[in-house]
Structures are given as C-alpha cells and as structure tokens.
Amino acid sequence: MKAVVVERYAPIDQIELKDVPSPSMEPGQVRVRVEAAGIGFVDGLKIEGRYQTKDPLPFIPGTEFAGVVTDAPGSPGGYQAGMRVMGMTRSGALAEEIVVGPEALHRLPDGVAAEVAASFRANYLTALYALSARASLVAGEQLLVLGAAGGTGTAAVQIGKLLGARVIAAASTPEKRDFAQAHGADAVIDYTQTGWRDTLKELTDGRGADVIFDPVGGEISVQAFRSIAWRGRHLVVGFAAGAIPALPFNLPLLKGGALLGVDLAQIAAREPDVQKRLMSELIGWLADGKLKPAVGRVFALEEFREAFKTMQTREALGKMVLRIAR
C-alpha cells in the first residue's frame, strides 16, 4: 500500500510517500480501506517531533480517517466487511489501509461523504467537550471564538450555536470572517486591529465574553482574557500562533475567571463515558443534518506536502483533507 512515512522527525518537505506492506492484523481488529484522512495542527507537530509526546520511528502520521471495512474476522464490535466507518487513532491514517480496534471506529451515517467524516471527529469532539463538559456553556451566553475559521474554531462556532449561545467569531482576514459568518457566527471581530477589545465590549454590552474558545495562544490569548466577563471561562485548546502565553495570576482574581484546559488526547482514557455520550450526541446531529462540518481544501494523497503547508498558513479555511481512495 502507499503511505506517508516519517523515518526521522523533519519538516514536511523531507517526508516521503512510500510503498510499504499492508499492516498485519491481530485478533479482534478491523481492517479499513481509507477513503479520506483529515490533517490537523497536531499532525504537523508530530511529524517534526515537536508534539509533547513522540511517536516511535518510523511511523505513518494521521489520526482521523473515514473509509470502508474490508476485513473484520469475528465481527469485533459488530463491524463487518462493507460497512462505512469513521475513526480516530494515534497514528497511521495517511495510508491506503489501516488496522484498528473496534473502539476506534464509529458507523458513518448514510449520506455523509468520507471527506466530511474525515474532518469531523477531532474538531467537533474537541469543541463539544470544551463548550459543554468543561465550560458548561448555556443558552444566551456570549461565546468568543478565536481562530474562528480554522478547523476547531469552525466547529466551536457551529456547536456554540446549537447550544444556544450568541457567537462572536474572531479572525484575522475578511475572508475568514465571512467564512465564520457563513457557518453561523452572529458577529465577527478583526483581532489584528488595536481596538478589537473595544469592539468586543460594544458587542457584549460592556460585559465581555462569558466563554472564550482559544486554539490560538500567543498575546491574543492574554488580551482576550482581559476582556472576559465576570465568572467567565477561558478554554485553552491549543497554540496555533506558536507561542504559549503567560497569564498574570492577578487577572483571574480580578475577573473571577477560570482557565480550563482541553486535551482531546486524554479524554478517552480519563473520561470514556463522557466521550461516548458526546460522540453519540455529535453523530446524532450529523445524521440529522444539524451539523454540517466545514471541509477545507481536498488534496490527493500525492499532494500531502501541499496539504500540510496550506494547513499551516494563516490563509487556511476549515480542515484540510486528503482523498486517498474511492
């Protein structure tokens, strides 16, 4: 099979597409022919060895995929050959085939394209876990989404609306702000402007945001927290800007505010029941058409380098996806 293979931690230009043996199966596992795989910010960090945990070399990157079951001896988890599935795993998705345990999979609702499914689970589970399980967002609250045109940002905009919040999307370009509004944002802010906090104050009648969804980091995070409402909750999702901010401890005291960490990688082990409940809710929304995941650009497997570079630029809208097979 063809697969993206990381033989040493390096920039994406130095990573190659190779012909490798199909993965072997152990009892209780399922083989999936991968139709599409999503590319996230974490995938780029793992390839370069800059993520907080390192995958043993060599490895096939990619955590999120959708495809068709081709082999499932004994029907583990009820999966059988021919079933359409989406899945999430530590690595291995940027390949024509993947072998996983049934716990990594979910049945794909009828009518949902593989490209949509491959851009769904990580972003939307992160957003729902953050907004519901961590921040306890309730209807009528003001939600500020930083990086609102990115993969997790777009998910937060859509899920915030489903939970009944008023969503204010912050993004750096007119195209990104238009994209956020097209996916449900009630108002938009250009956070590259020096007076953006004044705009936020006007939009929230002087209160500030009740909840801040923050996958960006850097100085923008500190500025956002300075505009949080009393008893507001700031969700630390990631650091796409590259810099980890240092927040003065007097600010949470003065604001009565809380910093809440959101790490999708730990939910399955630490809160499996919560993850199961949230995924059931998400798949229900997906099947009912209440959620329409925003797919960014779709690339062929051979174009994986361009896909990663596009994902890492400030111009990316939505989540990048590799189309691997049909």
Image: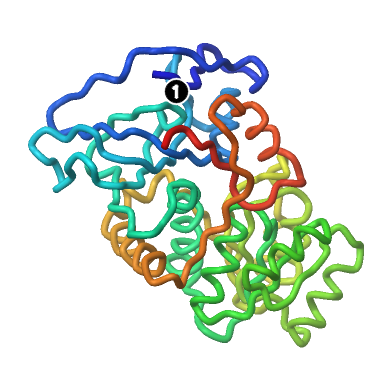
Which image quadrant is residue 258 in?
Answer: bottom right
Q: Which residue is drawn at 51% across and 64% down?
A: 292
Which image quadrant is residue 235 in?
Answer: bottom right
Rendered view: 235 above or below 186: above
> Can you identify the residue that label 1 sits on?
60
Q: Is residue 84 left or right of residue 168?
A: left
Q: Where is residue 209 in the image (x, y as percent from the top left)?
A: 68, 75
**Image quarter in which the C terminus is found:** top left
Extreme residue toward the right, this view = 194
Q: Is residue 173 left or right of residue 263?
A: right
Mark 1: give few (<14), some (14-19) or many (20+) Cα within 10 Å.
many
Q: Is residue 239 left or right of residue 108?
A: right
Q: Where is residue 278 in the image (x, y as percent from the top left)?
A: 35, 63
Label 1 SS: loop
Extreme residue toward the front, this view = 326
Q: Where is residue 269 in the image (x, y as percent from the top left)?
A: 31, 46
**Amino acid type at mark 1:** Ile
Q: Residue at x 83, y 61 (%)?
A: 174
Q: Residue at x 53, y 36 (%)?
A: 322
Q: Which of the pair 127/309 is nearer the observer?
A: 309
Rendered view: 83 above or below 90: below
Q: Which of the pair 49/116 is nearer the observer?
A: 116
